[in-house]
Image (cartoon, grey):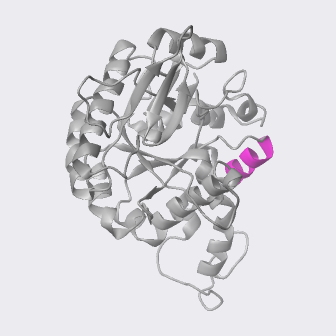
Amino acid sequence: MIVDAHAHVLPGGYPPGSPPTFPHTEMIDGSTDRLHHFGGGTFRAKDVFFEVDRRLEAMEVTGVDLEVVSPMPALLRYDLPAADGLTLARYVNEWVAELCRQAPDRFIGLGIVPLQSPELATAELADIKARGLAGVEVSSGILGASIGDPRFLSFFQEVERLELAVFVHAMPSDTDRLPAAARATYTVGVEGMYAAASLILGGIASACPDLRISFSHAAGGFPFLLPRANFFWGGTWNEEPADPERAFAWTAGPSPIEVARRFYYDSLVFDRRALRFLVDLLGADRLLLGSDFPAMHRETRVGATAASLGLSTESWEDLSWRNAMRWVGRDLT
């Protein structure tokens, strides 16, 4: 079985009379594609984003049995007034839930919340669960704050209490230290690292030990920096037993790597050598297949690179589907 745990959807349109802050769509003459306008940005969406039949056809071509679908990150409109953000989230969540109802054995859905207001976002989690959605997608940063900021602790505690999953999608951020062309590559990797590290350093990971959370693109540069963080914490190399007298930042409790192994990471790192590193450092039981489809092209057969690593049958079963089902809290049978 193959589960794609990082796949996106977009509504085909928005209801008449929507607030002016809502995205809007335009038909394209002679095409089934639609132009989506998001607060100053425009995106051309192929029909596979919003047509169930086309989606299922595409899954068959690339060997995907089930998708965990999340809204395109452009719908994470934390810049909107909180009330407008909530209205948009509710519309999108019901649209995702309806898509999943059309093929419940092929789609598991995630919703969105207006995290510009942590209180509103927290209150909305019960509605996400009531709609049958498995969890919530959030951005790596909210209005300049990383998700590990203490202001979001109550939100994550409620996610944990409701036994929902979280998908952290790294988002490009503006910086004058790199050219604009780096927003979708290097800055996304930095954002992923900020998100994962902030959850550890800000105390949310410790406060919510049962939180089921996954990071897009393996949390960017975070895994490669974990051994350095572990050295500063424990003063030793190669994850050897800690020596507090040699450590620069010793604290009692689990090491940074041990905490990081509570998280899940999608395997969308584009190279078998990078994926091998993730397997060796974090474990095959922490990784999910992901493609970013249809925003990115899938491998000809999803999971082909992971399958080339020569994993044991158990590790392959974990990576290809069981981890994803554990993450979203679904039965493994």
If the image is split into quadrants, where does the C terminus sit?
top left
Q: Quadrant of residue 203?
A: bottom left
Q: Is residue 258 left or right of residue 102?
A: right
Q: Find residue 32 and report its horizontal and vertical position in percent.
A: 52, 11
Q: Quadrant of the N terminus?
A: top right
Main secondary structure along the magenta-highlighted residues: helix
Residue 71 seen: no
Q: Does the magenta segment cover residue 131?
A: no
State the image quarter where residue 96 is shown: top left
Q: Which residues are magenta?
A: 272-280
Residue sitting nearer the eye, 238 or 165: 165
Query: Does the magenta run of residues contain 273?
Result: yes
Rendered location of residue 284, percent (x, y): 63, 44
Residue 18 in percent (x, y) is at 26, 31
Q: Nearer the viewer, residue 122 or 120?
A: 120
Res 266 seen here: yes
**Foreground of the two, 221 or 262:** 221
Q: Is residue 171 left or right of residue 14?
A: right
Residue at screen point 47% across, 42% down:
40
